[in-house]
Amino acid sequence: MEPLVLPSFNLPGPLDLPRMEIAVPVFPAPSHPVLIPPSVEPKPPPEPPKAVDPGARQAVKGLQDQVKQLNLNIKAQQQSIDNLLNPPEIEKVEPKVAKVAVPGTPLEFALPSAEVLTVATVTAGAAAAASVGATMAAQNLTKRLKPVFQTALKKVAKARGADLETYGRRRLRLRRSREKPT
């Protein structure tokens, strides 16, 4: 008897599909010191009087520096408010979708990305494992705990003084009571 010879086929190699690349958007970091409405005009720093002692002159100088800093903060806030009201244009990226054409037909199908396939596979595997594991655990628990519960219920019924009768004995008693002529 000759051994079975199976036909062999030369299958095409794997498809080289393009991967989708999305550039990470870059946004300027917001900075908000103290919010002042944009309608407030910056005030000029006060001028120190001519004949004043040096301590007061230093205090006025410190006040002038603080006013300058506040004016800079106001300008920065106005710029950030302008950026919020008129945000800069974000460059649009067209998604790349891998498509495969079925040979000999006009059909064309979009392929999911590798990330989508990975998530779907892992989710399906986890669901299957959880389902099978839960079924096996439930069967095992039922097999082990059913005799324990039956014994406990029998003891409770006996302690209450109830007449213990199995399902089969009850059916037999009812059948015999029906057969008796009255």
Image (cartoon, helix red, strand yellow):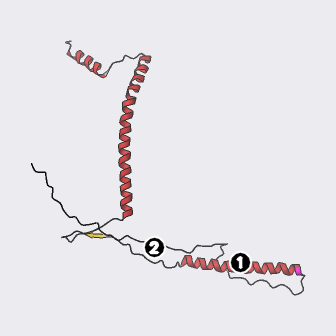
**Quadrant that contains the C terminus:** top left
On the image, which quarter does residue 34 sit in? bottom right
Residue 30 numbered tag: none
| Closer-to-camera residue (63/151) | 151
Residue 87 placement (x, y as % from top left) = 52, 77
Tags 2 and 1 in contact by the CB under 8 Å rule? no
* Residue at mark 2: 23
* Residue at mark 1: 70
Q: Please tell me whether the stretch drawn in magenta is mainly helix, strand or loop.
A: loop
| Closer-to-camera residue (123/157) | 123
The Cα atoms of the two marked residues, 2 and 1, are separated by 38 Å
Rate crowding at label 1 as few (under 14), some (14 to 19) or many (20 or more) other CA atoms within 10 Å.
Answer: some
Magenta region, residue range: 42-54
Residue 142 placement (x, y as % from top left) = 37, 32
Residue 53 falls inside the magenta stretch: yes
Relative to 168, does residue 69 appear above or below in the rendering?
Answer: below
Relative to 68, does residue 169 appear above or below in the rendering?
Answer: above
Q: Residue at x 38, y 24 (%)?
A: 150
Relative to 158, does residue 13 appear above or below in the rendering?
Answer: below
Q: Residue at x 36, y 45 (%)?
A: 131
Q: Residue at x 49, y 79 (%)?
A: 89
